[in-house]
Amino acid sequence: MVEYRMRVHVVGNRQSPAVANLGLLKTPQVSENEVGSDVRKCVSSDFYVDDGITSVSTPEKAIWLMKQTQRALALNGNLRLHKLASNNETVIAAFPQVDLAKDLASLDLTKDELPLQRSLVLTLDLRKDCFTFQVSHTDKPFTRRGILSVVNSLYHPLGFVALATILGKCMLKEMTVVNDGWDNPLPDKYLKPWKE
């Protein structure tokens, strides 16, 4: 009997994303003895598809973790971890330009502002070290349909803005009792809370 092993997965197959994620998760497990359990934890907990967002207490730990993660992924999975970004200049300086995010590679850290980074539809302000979200400023009518459109347009896979979307959904539920049509204007008493 001849045994065949698949070494390449066809892109576009229905299973391809799941296989790619499984490969990413398994790769640091194979080299855990060499690079440590922190790398495995980082990849399994802090990656979403192919974007990783993690936080550590010191620049030295960040540099070590990223270099070890790069090593583990390259060694056992032939994967290149790049497009790195950090809010710390020491971390950015520790990596070659080819490994940095596109807008950080040509940055002069002594005089240029750190640019915004986008990941998982989040915007990370490196200077302030905080996530920001952009809500569409398209004027929607003050109707049930308009409010539903605004509430559902905010995609947040990590749940950072769940409080705002839940409040919007609760307000929408309350307005449903008062107004029976999707395109009928809502009572003025809801306008101020909605804008807030």
Image (tube, helix red, strand yellow):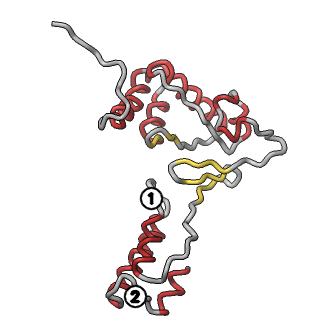
Residue at screen point 30% across, 38% down: 14
Please give the name of the residue rendered at 66% of the width and 38% of the height, measured from the top-left corner.
Answer: 102
| CA distance for labels 2 and 1 | 31 Å
Nearest the viewer among 84 and 94 is 84
The furthest residue to the right? 111
Image location of residue 171, percent across then percent down: 41, 80
Compared to 34, does 159 lie above or below? below
Horizontal relation, residue 144 to residue 102: left or right = left
Locate residue 54 relative to residue 60 in the image: left or right: left
Where does the image place residue 47, in percent across and percent down from the top left? 46, 40
The answer to whether the residues at label 2 and label 1 have Cβ atoms under 8 Å apart is: no
Say above or below: 92 vs 161.
above
Please tell me the numbered disc located at residue 159.
1
Mark carried by residue 40: none
For residue 86, what is the image quadrant?
top right
- State the SS at label 2: loop
